[in-house]
């Protein structure tokens, strides 16, 4: 029997756990100032990456070896004002937006991290999550290291600084650091004279490169290049280190193995719809997911709608394939954050109406197919279905553009333990009943390749399969049952 008190649980202070998974961070860096001051370019880039993190943000600028920075808790538009950007003058920068999946949500964990050591100053911005950060941190602490934050990005900074003491260059220090860290990292490192971009050998998190005048730009997504007027050049390859300095651009591919596994959920939900990741359009991938769902789970209906934002693209694809008209059926309030305080149970039940509201004239009396990107905890799908019924929908058929989540993620996504995954507690049919939908259908696992237009698997789908492509924490390797999940098929 389902424990309804569990699924209606909340975090301290009345803040409910987010139903959607969240990605940890976004990074942006620029070398060169002939077109736009780096701080202003970073500001525009971070605005475009705001969807990747809304807890804190920061910009660090290098002015001929002198690094200044500004960072704080809050949205990019709240943290930075013209007077702040005007103070950040220089020739290159690294910047960051953060959502915490590892480390507390506190001001000292905001990035970029700026570290002063015997070789000068390093500024680091990191997207991802190290799976061996705890072991490395403990080793460093036993050797006398004092940490100022609780994030694994500081672990990376310490190792780079340590390796720099025995290396002829900062890029050599980064090259020597990469075999020591495991998991996901798209990394920007700014030294007194160089800007370095590095991506883990699996390529879990995206990282691309562009040109802005005579300068070079690195960003988590191509939409950030567009925002600052940069021209896309290419993606940073998994395992690659790209170095930009006064002599030009250099690539180090010592750690490029060819065994890549970027996160499939970037295409399903994380990335902005106008981005292109590793040569694949996010918009087209989401539309294809909708087309696949229309073939796998057809239904007679009058209207197809999408849950904003990522559900809309899949809904368009479902409509195109099925011939059922698409129309906007739900309006999203874009000014509500990821979590907000709901002190009473009734307010928690009604909270979905603060973020989402149906268009009564569109859905009333209609048989609706509603597309959403995922169901994680199962805490909101029933509310959205109920909301549509209250608006007069005759039928509501739920279609999900991803397979059921059955495993936690350790590479920088806050997909939780199996105790919080509804697909580990209930069958698909039971999830459908809980949601109150007339029918439910998830995207089939073996169609993920087709979704992104690939002939064979070349991505990480561990959250759906438990097949982790890189080392995971020891308690998983030892098979502790509290982290294992067997999908329910009854």
Image (tube, rainbow, N blue to C red):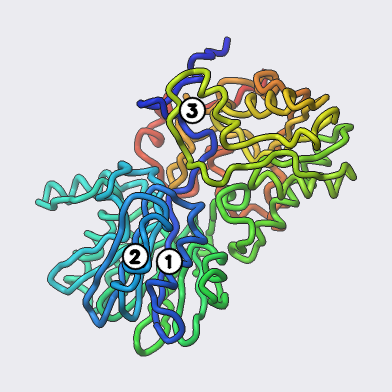
Q: Kindly give the residue lying farthest to the top in the view shown.
A: 1
Is there a contact, CB below 8 Å, between mark 1 and mark 3?
Answer: no
**Whole-percent x, y for residue 89 in the image:** 31, 77
- Residue found at x 27% / y 44%: 134
Left-right relation of 303 to 72: right
Q: Which residue is mark 3?
A: 418
Q: Secondary structure at mark 2?
A: strand
Q: Is residue 465 left or right of residue 158?
A: right
Query: What residue is pinned by disc 1?
Result: 43
Q: Is residue 184 left or right of residue 163?
A: right
Q: Residue at x 35, y 83 (%)?
A: 245
Residue 414: x and y in percent read 45, 40
Res 59 label:
2
- Above or below residue 295? Residue 481 is above
- Asked which quadrant contains residue 246, the reply is bottom left
CA neighbours of label 2 inside 10 A, class few (<14), some (14 to 19), many (20+): many
Q: Secondary structure at mark 1?
A: helix
Q: Name the spot of residue 72 as percent of width and height, x first.
A: 31, 54
Q: Nearer the viewer, residue 203 or 356?
A: 356
Q: Quadrant of the N terminus?
A: top right
Q: Nearer the viewer, residue 310 or 330?
A: 330
Identify the residue at the far left of this view: 144
Mark yes or no: residue 402 visible: yes
Q: Are marks 1 and 2 in contact (CB under 8 Å)?
A: yes
Q: CA distance from mark 1 to mark 3?
A: 38 Å
N-term-proximal mark, 1 vs 3: 1
Residue count near mark 3 (Cα–Cα under 10 Å), binned few <14, some 14–19, many ≥20: many
Whole-number angstrom distance, CA of label 2 to CA of label 3: 36 Å
Q: In the figure, is residue 114 to the left or right of 258? A: left
Mark-to-mark CA distance, 1 and 2:
8 Å
């Amino acid at each position: 029997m389902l424990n309804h008190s569990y699924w209606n649980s909340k975090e301290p202070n009345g803040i409910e756990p987010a139903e959607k998974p969240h990605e940890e961070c976004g990074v942006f860096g620029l070398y060169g100032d002939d077109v736009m001051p780096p701080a202003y370019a970073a500001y525009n880039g971070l605005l475009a990456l705001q969807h990747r993190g809304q807890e804190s943000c920061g910009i660090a600028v290098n002015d001929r070896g002198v690094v200044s920075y500004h960072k704080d808790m809050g949205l990019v538009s709240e943290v930075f004002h013209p007077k702040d950007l005007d103070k950040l003058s220089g020739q290159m920068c690294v910047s960051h937006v953060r959502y915490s999946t590892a480390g507390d949500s506190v001001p000292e964990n905001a990035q970029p991290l700026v570290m002063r050591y015997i070789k000068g100053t390093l500024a680091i911005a990191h997207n991802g999550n190290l799976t061996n950060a705890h072991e490395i941190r403990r080793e460093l602490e036993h050797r006398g290291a004092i940490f100022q934050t609780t994030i694994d990005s500081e672990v990376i900074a310490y190792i780079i600084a340590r390796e720099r003491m025995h290396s002829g260059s900062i890029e050599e220090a980064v090259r020597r650091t990469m075999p020591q860290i495991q998991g996901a990292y798209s990394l920007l490192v700014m030294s007194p004279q160089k800007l370095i971009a590095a991506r883990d050998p699996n390529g879990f998190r995206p990282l691309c490169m562009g040109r802005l005048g005579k300068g070079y730009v690195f960003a988590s997504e191509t939409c950030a290049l567009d925002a600052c007027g940069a021209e896309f050049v290419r993606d940073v390859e998994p395992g690659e280190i790209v170095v930009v300095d006064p002599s030009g651009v250099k690539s180090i591919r010592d750690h490029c193995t060819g065994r890549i596994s970027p996160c499939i959920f970037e295409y399903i939900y994380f990335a902005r719809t106008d981005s292109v990741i590793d040569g694949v359009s996010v918009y087209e991938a989401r539309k294809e997911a909708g087309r696949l769902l229309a073939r796998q789970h057809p239904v007679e209906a009058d209207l197809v709608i999408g849950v904003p934002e990522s559900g809309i693209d899949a809904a368009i694809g479902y409509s195109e394939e099925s011939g059922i008209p698409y129309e906007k059926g739900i309006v999203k309030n874009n000014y509500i954050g990821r979590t907000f305080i709901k002190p009473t149970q009734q307010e928690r039940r009604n909270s979905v109406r603060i973020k989402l509201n149906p268009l009564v004239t569109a859905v009333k009396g209609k048989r609706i197919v509603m597309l959403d990107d995922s169901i994680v905890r199962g805490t909101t799908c029933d509310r959205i279905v109920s909301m549509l019924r209250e608006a007069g929908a005759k039928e509501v058929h739920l279609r999900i553009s991803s397979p059921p989540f059955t495993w936690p993620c350790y590479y920088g996504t806050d997909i939780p333990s199996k105790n919080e995954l509804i697909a580990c507690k209930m069958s698909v049919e039971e999830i459908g009943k809980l949601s109150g939908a007339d029918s439910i259908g998830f995207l089939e696992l073996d169609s993920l390749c087709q979704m992104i237009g690939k002939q064979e698997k070349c991505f990480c789908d561990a959250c759906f399969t438990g097949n982790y492509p890189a080392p995971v924490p020891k308690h998983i390797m030892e098979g502790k049952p509290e982290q294992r999940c067997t999908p329910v098929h009854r």
